[in-house]
Image: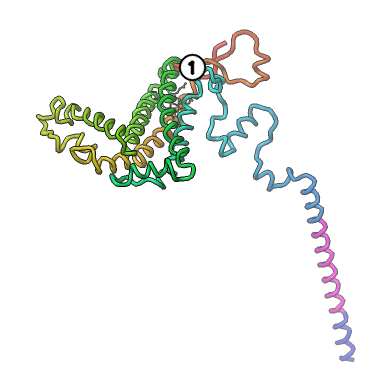
Amino acid sequence: MAEENGRKEGQSAGVGLLESVREKTKQATQTILEKAKEDLQTLKEPEKTQLWRSIFRVKHDDTPRNRALSVLTNVFFHLHPAKVNRDAVRYSFTWGMGGITFYLFIVLTFTGILLMFYYHPTKVQAFRDILYLEHDVPFGKLLRNMHRWAAHLMIIAVWLHMFRVFMTGSYKRPREFNWCVGVVLMVLTMLLSFTGYLLPDDQLGFWAVTVGTNMARATPLLGHEGPFGPQLGMTPYNDVRFALLGGSIVDANALLRAYIWHCIAIPVLAAIFMGVHFWRVRKDGGISGPAPVMLESEIKEEKGPRPVIMRPAGTKEWEKTK
Ligand code: HEM
């Protein structure tokens, strides 16, 4: 009797186990089917998945909000303002000279780093390295000339940029500070050019730096021939010219100093000031100019005088006029 009871209990436990296994298999099949359905849907409409939405976060319908969002949520676009004054993209207004100056700075940095692989700032090596670059290094002549021409062009471009800023009155309120940052950039650009001139250690560079640094003798207070210099104890052996040359004549120390100023200190300073310069362009309400920020469609609808919603050069407030 007890044996039979035991068998029955065993049987019902077996049935229960079978049931639960069946139930679990059913659930698993259901889950797999649902997942397969989801995957199929994903393949058909990938743009509806969470992954897609996490990457492409903005709809691209042509509305002002979506235009702004697509710029603000994209790391590369975000370097630019969400809305741009139409004058800012008109070459006849800016001549693109600020952008071209910056582009030339990038070219100079790149070619300059490559030149550093071949150049030693010593009296024995410097000029020989230049000859080696010109005649033996593959594409060395091209590299050197790219650096030299980009330097000449940067000087021309920065002057034209300054001239344009002056002619469009863009130095006026609220852009006075950026004008001052620009003046520093201009000085740094000239100093880059001047320090680079000595590096080939040829006659041209030697005499240019001799004349240039001789002018430093006459610096007020800091030059031994300048106003109040001698009274402050300046001599040819402790004044600003001595500091620039690392001695009293243009020689090995001057070459090394020019090299360090040219390749490290001035480019780093210029890059920092350029960062501030671009930041101020945005903070001052974008590039100056009277044109309003409008969509093409809004421009077509517009009748009569255009509303001004940017801050034009020389005005105190943001304006909206009709
Ligand atoms: C390394 C030198 C420089 C670089 C790379 C540079 C770059 C730029 C760029 C990209 C812009 C945007 C508009 C444009 O492209 O014209 C700009 C605007 C401006 N820059 Fe420069 N710049 C330099 C030197 C100067 C100098 C020498 C001045 C004046 C002394 C100056 C004053 C200004 C001002 C006031 C603006 C705003 C102009 C506006 O709102 O219309 N910059 N700069």
Which stretch is magenta? Answer: 12-33
* Image mark count: 1
Describe residue 303's horizontal placement relative to residue 116 as left or right: right
Question: What residue is at 28 percent from the left and 44 percent from the top?
Answer: 123
Quadrant of the image containing the N terminus: bottom right
Question: Residue 195: image x %, image y %?
Answer: 32, 35
Instruction: Say how the picture is coloured.
Output: rainbow
Q: Is residue 26 magenta?
A: yes
Question: What residue is at 52 percent from the left and 19 percent from the top?
Answer: 310
Residue located farthest toward the front when viewing the structure as drawn: 135
Kind of residue indicated by mark 1: Pro
The residue singled out by tag 1 in the image is 312
**Predominant SS of the magenta segment:** helix
Describe residue 90's horizontal placement relative to residue 104 as left or right: right
Question: What residue is at 86 percent from the left and 71 percent from the top?
Answer: 19
Question: What residue is at 45 percent from the left and 42 percent from the top?
Answer: 140
In the image, 112 versus 181, the foreground residue is 112
Q: Is mark 1 within 8 Å of ligand 1?
A: no
